[in-house]
Amino acid sequence: MSSPVPPLPRWADLFLLPLINLMAALFVCGLVVLLIGENPIEALGVMVKGAFVYPGGLGYTLYYTTNFIFTGLAVATAFHALLFNIGGEGQAYVAGLGAALAAFAVSAAPAIVAIPFAILGAALAGAIWGVIPGYLQAKRGSHIVITTIMFNFIAASIMVWLLAGPMLEPGQQSPQSVKLPEASYLPKLHDLLGLIGAKTTATPLNVSFLLALISLGVFWILIWRTRLGYAIRAVGHNPEAAHYAGINVARTIIIAMAIAGAFAGLLATNEIVGVSHRVILNYTAGYGFTGIAVALMGRNHPIGIFLAALLFGALYQGGAELDFEFKSITREMVLLIQGMIILFSGALAYMFNAPLSRLIARVSAPKEMARG
Amino acid sequence: MADFLFQLLLTFDGTLRIATPLILCAMAGIFAERSGVIDISLEGKLLTGAFVAAAVAFISGSAWLGVAAAILASVTLSLIHGFACITHKGNQVVSGVAINILASGLTVVVGIALFQRGGQTPTLPRDVRFKPLEWIGVESVEAIPVLGAIYSQLISGHNVLVYIALLAVPLTGFILYRTRFGLRLRAVGEVPEAVDSAGISVTWLRYRALIVGGVFCGIAGAYLSVAQGGNFVRDMSAGKGYIALAAVIFGNWKPMMALIACLMFGFLEAATSRLQGVDLPLVGELPTQLMLALPYVLTVLLLAGFIGKPTPPAAIGEPYIK
């Protein structure tokens, strides 16, 4: 038998381990690039340049980051209640419908009314699509993983039907809705910066990014500073104990899923109210699934989620650059990196745990002996 | 009336074609889940199988080599799944999600690197695909009304992988209920402690269950790209792995019941595509896209206990810790 593994120091658990997992994921992807016959270091360089250096690169990176903060929060909120929300994709998709309907409901209103309405519409629709699986889990015992997967597909079918039928813009061939009323359009950050005299490249980055940062703060307060957050974490740690402590477990699960869905729904604020101004077929483009990677890497903590979302934002923007610079590697490389990150920092999260803690214990042991 | 019967026959024929990959993946799902391992990665294995089969069949010029390679690739993914959630006791759902995303990226990346066709593989020549098998005596019985048509259309005239899929169901049933391996496999999904205390390795049993599942998914993938279609198209599995998972649940983790669920889901899709744009009496034109959501809606209703009561394996989703 191997000796018991000493616990990992906090700094190593929070920073070193995720970093090692990220490195392992990038290493495997680098091998794939090598096998394809390209230079992985060069590819990484192109991605970094595309994400941060080229004009507008940073704006696009932060625009993607916004999406990943929302979907990451959607997964993390549920995670704290030990619920695995794979339904971020569907919740965000339906939220597009909610945002559009809300914007049309107040089509004559000025921006000050139209914008909050559209945002609330998105959050509400997402919450509804999250709360049904939550209810089915809490009250009927359906496995939330399976239900949320099914809800992704149900959402996709409903949206295809709506976009190709009732919501289709007349004269349009590709399934997309009519344009939202102009008053609901979110201001772009480069326009706002222009107002105070700073000239920046035009990018899709809009005030949703600020909304995402606020959401991170709200999430932190909710989970660690409120009674509800305490209930959510208690249910996540031990539902029986939570029940005996007087927490209504079913209600907590339902509320947690509603909040998770609402966070996912805010993706529509960025994509639809902020940028495309109309609902487009498959506009969620897998962002909901990336949220799983973001939450896992970010350890369900707002700072971690921000950093992980930024990483994925950079990967998405930098990945787009691969298409231009290389003949044989494309942006799908990012999916590979994403899958590897979920594998290493999610499913294999503790593979490096034991060896790492033994190593740290060995390195720090002589010092302690000297002290003792 | 004769026309209606013929249409129905064609729909049943289509049902079988659509259900084939579902059946194979559902059997794979039954093996994994009966051993206590959630297998969301059916989708990823199916997709990878489809890509590898088409690529290898094109390069080697042999459809069977394509199938063999697809099985190998799919089993490799099974082993990764096992390594993560059996050996390292990782979260089975997370591992499955990772494999699915990995598959959707890797198939396109490697596809573009190999063939430079935007992620597609070149169209396979006719002789490198699985052709429909004509059964004996088709020509002589074709003239017989009804039965002749059933024999020539429905029973005969499919490619070999369709028949393999249909045989996979009794085979799965036999292994699960009539062999020592199957008995242990079911036990390890219910009470792994008991299997362990009998001196049988829980780990090795679950690995074997995943490997068998990998074989089935590989064949299913090959069916998509080398039999049903003539090349690989990106994301060509299009959620079929998830529908198969739904069929496993719908079939209450039993092979025959899962087969019926697969045929039902297949029939829904076949009928929907036949009825597209047709003005039906009383109901008018069917909303095709909505009809395609029916398998998912039905599964949700079933899981919620509104139609029947599902009884999943007791130890499903939990890594075994001694």
Image (cartoon, coloured by chain):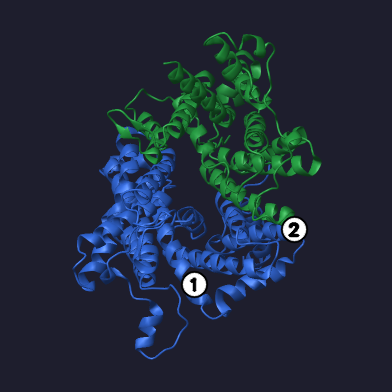
Chain colours: A blue, B green
Q: Chain of mark 1?
A: A
Q: Quadrant of residue B300?
A: top left
The local crowd at label 1, few if under 14, some if 14 to 19, many if 20 or more residues have their Cα within 10 Å, is many
Give the secondary structure at mark 1. Answer: helix
Q: Residue furthest bottom?
A: A197
Do the residues at discs 1 and 2 belong to one chain? yes
Give the secondary structure at mark 2. Answer: helix
Q: Residue furthest right?
A: B60
Q: Is residue A315 above or below residue B45?
A: below
User: Closest to the observer: A101 or B106?
Assistant: A101
The local crowd at label 2, few if under 14, some if 14 to 19, many if 20 or more residues have their Cα within 10 Å, is some
Q: Amino acid at mark 1?
A: Tyr
Label ID, residue B208: none
Q: Is residue B97 above or below residue B118?
A: above
Q: Amino acid at mark 2?
A: Ile
Q: Is residue B300 above or below residue A352?
A: above
User: Closest to the observer: B62 or A30?
Assistant: B62
The residue that disc 1 covers is A60
Q: Residue at x 24, y 59 (%)?
A: A102
Label ID, residue A36: 2
User: Closest to the observer: A81 or B279?
Assistant: B279
Q: Chain of mark 2?
A: A
Left or right position of A131 against A10: left
Instruction: Look at the image and tell me in which quarter the N terminus of chain A lies.
Output: top right
> How many numbered markers are drawn?
2
Q: Percent from the top left, x then y, of residue A241?
A: 34, 41
**Looking at the image, can residue B19 be seen?**
yes
Left or right position of B96 against B126: left
